[in-house]
Image (spheres, rainbow, N blue to C red):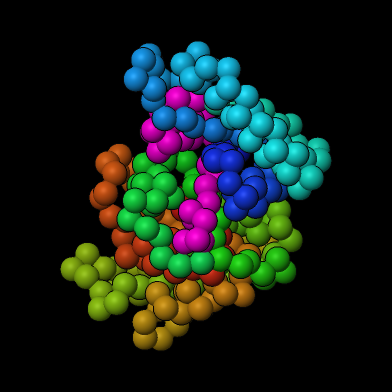
């Protein structure tokens, strides 16, 4: 997809770091960066997407543009060659960002300020978006190791191909190794696949990718015991964790599978959630 990288702008100091990550992602992908600030519906608002200054007055418009201008300065500092656009839209943040994500190469959000290094709040924007966006979602959290590997969570069979393609592309663009970590739910489940089935699915997912990305060194790791915990531990020395999610649920509150939830809640580096 050649659409822009979309990042939500909220005017907070912690959000500026998220904007910088998004700008660097746009630079790696060779696409533009779209800074999107969402304001709540005023009582007299009309349809989705009308400019906020039509309903909030000139003062509200000025403050939003000031936040976007500051975000743009940080984006330029992080990635000077990236083309940047900015927009203020009216609506509920998760609804607006879900809509704009449909034409985006990547949607980027933070893990909500103080929660960036711990479990996501149930009502957090990142958690609500995780089950709704149609394209890849990057949740900026943790303290990534800039020279560490990219991690690919191997869990089940249906999501491996899309997640593996994203992980290989990121590892190549970052000049990083790729580590595939088998991450199985605690205790398994009635729908859990066998290790042999997972190995076959992984081999199929990797078919052609090694040839397409000869610069990427791939290593596979199968932890013993509680492998979701091993995934979190591995993230502490990594620069990105890529996790595949089954389908697009479309309803706020429906949970992702346990491995996706663990990654979003506990990883010590940014998490890319790839809906497959």
- Residue 210 figure quarter: bottom right
State which region is magenta.
Answer: 89-116
Above or below — where is 26 with respect to 21?
Answer: above
Nearest the viewer among 129 and 41 is: 41
Nearest the viewer among 249 and 23 is: 23
Say if the magenta span includes residue 101: yes
The image shows residue 78 at horizontal and vertical percentages of: 76, 48
The image shows residue 235 at horizontal and vertical percentages of: 54, 72
Q: Residue lying farthest front?
A: 59
Q: Quadrant where the N terminus lies?
A: top right
Q: Residue at point 22% right, 70% down?
A: 189
Q: Residue at point 41% right, 65% down?
A: 119
Q: Residue lying farthest left?
A: 190
Say if the magenta span includes residue 228: no
Above or below — where is 275 with respect to 185?
Answer: above
- Residue 63 figure quarter: top right
Q: Residue at point 43% right, 50% down?
A: 126
The image shows residue 47 at horizontal and vertical percentages of: 38, 15
The image shows residue 225 at horizontal and vertical percentages of: 36, 86
Q: Residue at point 43% right, 56% down?
A: 244
Nearest the viewer among 219 and 42 is: 42
The answer to whether 106 appears left or right of 171 in the picture is: left
């Amino acid at each position: 997809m050649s659409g822009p990288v979309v990042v939500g702008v909220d005017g907070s100091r912690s959000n500026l770091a998220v904007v910088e990550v998004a700008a660097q992602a746009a630079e790696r992908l060779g696409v533009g960066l779209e800074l999107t600030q969402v304001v709540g519906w005023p009582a007299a608002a009309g349809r989705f997407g009308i400019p906020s200054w039509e309903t909030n007055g000139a003062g509200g418009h000025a403050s939003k543009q000031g936040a976007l201008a500051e975000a743009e300065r940080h984006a330029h500092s992080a990635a000077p060659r990236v083309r940047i656009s900015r927009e203020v839209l009216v609506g509920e943040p998760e609804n607006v960002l879900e809509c704009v994500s449909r034409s985006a190469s990547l949607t980027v959000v933070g893990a909500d300020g103080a929660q960036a290094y711990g479990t996501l709040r149930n009502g957090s924007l990142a958690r609500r978006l995780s089950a709704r966006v149609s394209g890849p979602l990057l949740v900026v959290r943790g303290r990534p190791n800039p020279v560490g590997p990219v991690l690919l969570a191997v869990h089940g069979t249906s999501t491996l191909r899309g997640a593996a393609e994203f992980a290989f592309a990121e590892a190549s663009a970052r000049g990083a190794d790729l580590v595939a970590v088998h991450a199985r739910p605690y205790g398994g489940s009635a729908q859990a696949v066998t290790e042999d089935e997972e190995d076959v699915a992984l081999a199929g997912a990797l078919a052609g990718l090694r040839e397409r990305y000869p610069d990427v060194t791939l290593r596979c790791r199968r932890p013993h015991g509680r492998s979701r915990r091993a995934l979190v531990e591995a993230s502490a020395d990594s620069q990105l964790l890529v996790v595949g999610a089954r389908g697009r649920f479309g309803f706020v509150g429906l949970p992702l599978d346990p491995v996706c939830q663990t990654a979003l809640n506990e990883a010590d580096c940014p998490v890319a959630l790839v809906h497959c």
